[in-house]
Image: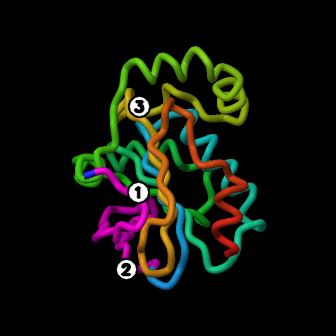
Amino acid sequence: MQLTQGMQLEDLTLPNINGSQFELKDVTGKKALISFFRYSSCPFCHLRIHEIIERQSDFGKPFEEIFIFNCKLRDLKVTSSMHDSSVTVLADENRTYFDRYEVPKSAVKTLVGAATGFSRFRKAVSTGFSPLSKPSGAFTGMPVDVLIDEAGIVQRVLYGSSTFDHIPIEEVIEFSKT
């Protein structure tokens, strides 16, 4: 089932790159951004995380940023090593939640992203995110961003139309403060 506004987000339990086990109940009482990403070394995905981390001082408190990749945990640990521990980075190796919430794959949208996202790709690579470092997971996956409130209710969801289509950071910041 696709996520929709007003839906109660159900259990989400996945391994964290920091060695712990993440459970959705750990963020009860906090607003959160949950993003489903592509493969382990996706430069668009890691650039997005980098940009979120750079803006953390603008977010309301308490607010959590949770990033889920469809890949092997061991590979994600390597490719996420440039990010600090202020965000939660999880691996859904078996596509449990990707399939449950119908996170799409699309070769066509991947090509659209490659054709229209060259400047973002260049920025990601110049920031240090290599698309070839430990690649595992869904290369043709599309991102999905979900904003949940303190009770775990979906307030906004965006199923990306390309490999770098996300809820604008300014909108995430506004949500975090309301």
Q: Nearer the viewer, mark 3 or mark 1?
A: 1
Is residue 24 shown above or below 50? Answer: below
Q: Which residue is mark 2?
A: 25
Query: x%, y% of residue 88?
Result: 50, 63
With 165 as the anchor, is 118 left or right in this view?
A: right
Q: Badge 1: how crowded within 10 Å, few (<14), some, or many (20+)? A: many
Query: x%, y% of residue 70?
Result: 34, 44
Query: x%, y% of residue 110?
Result: 45, 23
Task: Identify the magenta region.
Answer: 2-27
Kind of residue indicated by mark 1: Leu
**Which residue is at a point 64% across and 67% down the rendered structure image?**
175
Kind of residue indicated by mark 3: Pro
Front-most of residues 124 and 64: 64
Kind of residue indicated by mark 2: Lys
Q: Secondary structure under badge 1? A: strand
Q: Secondary structure under badge 2? A: helix
What's the distance in space between the residues labelled 3 and 2, CA to CA?
30 Å
First in sequence, mark 3 or 2: give its number. 2
Q: Is residue 91 magenta?
A: no
* Residue 90, disc: 1
Is residue 142 shown above or below 33? Answer: above
* Residue 50, disc: none
With 160 as the anchor, is 118 left or right in this view?
A: right
Q: Which residue is mark 3?
A: 135
Residue projecting furthest to the front: 6
